[in-house]
Amino acid sequence: MISKLLNYYPEAVQKLSSISLDTDKTPYESLCIDESKFLSFDTIIKKAFSQKQPASFDLLTTYKKKLFCVEFKNSRPRDIKNRGVQNKAIEGIASLYSITESLDIKLNEYERYYIVFYKPLIIKQATKSQNFLHNRATKKVIEFGLEKYHKTFYDHILTKECKDYKHIKSKLSI
């Protein structure tokens, strides 16, 4: 799947630092500082829908028969607007179906993941055990109202602190 997309959208291959760049903040700030290369789904969307772009997630990649649609939010969870993350999930996957259908790629053959990475919640004044308990309490929660898309549009939904991306990054780099 990725190789077919690369044939049509070679300009979409970008460094993770560029894909996770937040241009809404001044100065611009990347959530993940990394030179690994991935597909920028935003770049694909701009080319595929030149007139009016739908909302879309930031990164698209596959690993075996798993499809990862990743959104980077350079904010703490309390500052992230649920509706924006939800729109990116829904409009992004609908757009991806439209794009892949024209390339004869069958998305239903893939296990679909939607992952939202956000800024860590480490509390500076907290003790080590308080931070541990906080991290443990939030580990299995699907945030931002995305649970309604679990087992419908996506097989799996993960909302994680950005430090967790390193665990999957090495397997997903193109």
Image (cartoon, rainbow, N blue to C red):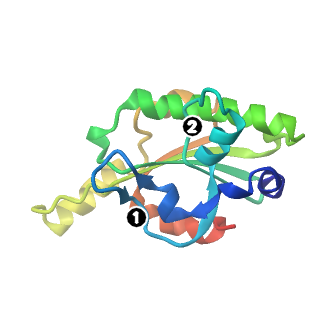
Q: Residue furthest front?
A: 51
Q: Nearer the viewer, residue 25 or 143?
A: 25
Q: Residue at x 47, y 56 (%)?
A: 20
Above/below status of 12 relative to 90: below
Instruction: Name the residue nearer the viewer: 134 or 5.
Output: 5
Q: Give the tally of numbered discs.
A: 2
- State the image quarter where residue 45 is shown: top right
Tell me the distance, in whole angstroms, between the alpha carbons under discs 2 and 1.
Answer: 22 Å
Q: Which residue corresponds to the image point at 53% horizontal and 73% vertical from the top-left?
A: 35
Viewport quadrant of the C terminus: bottom right
Q: Nearer the viewer, residue 18 or 70?
A: 18
- Which numbered disc flags the more N-terminal residue, 2 or 1? 2
- Look at mark 1 in the image and give the residue it sits on: 163
Above or below residue 19? Residue 82 is above
Q: Which of the two discs, 2 and 1, sits closer to the camera?
A: 2
Closer-to-camera residue (69/143): 69
Q: Is residue 108 left or right of residue 139?
A: right
Mark 2 touching mark 1, by CB under 8 A? no
124 relative to 59 in the view: left or right: left
Q: Which residue is mark 2?
A: 56
Q: Position of residue 68 (x, y in %)?
A: 64, 50
In this image, 143 relative to 37: left or right? left
Q: Position of residue 96 (x, y in %)?
A: 71, 37
Task: Kindly identify the amino acid type of the residue bearing the numbered disc 2.
Answer: Ser
- Looking at the picture, does residue 132 appear above or below residue 53? below
Mark 2 is surrounded, within 10 Å at the Cα level, by few (under 14), some (14 to 19) or many (20 or more) other residues, namely: many
Percent from the top left, x then y, of residue 50? 66, 33
Where's residue 70, x and y in %? 55, 49
User: In the rendered image, which quarter is residue 127 located in?
Assistant: bottom left
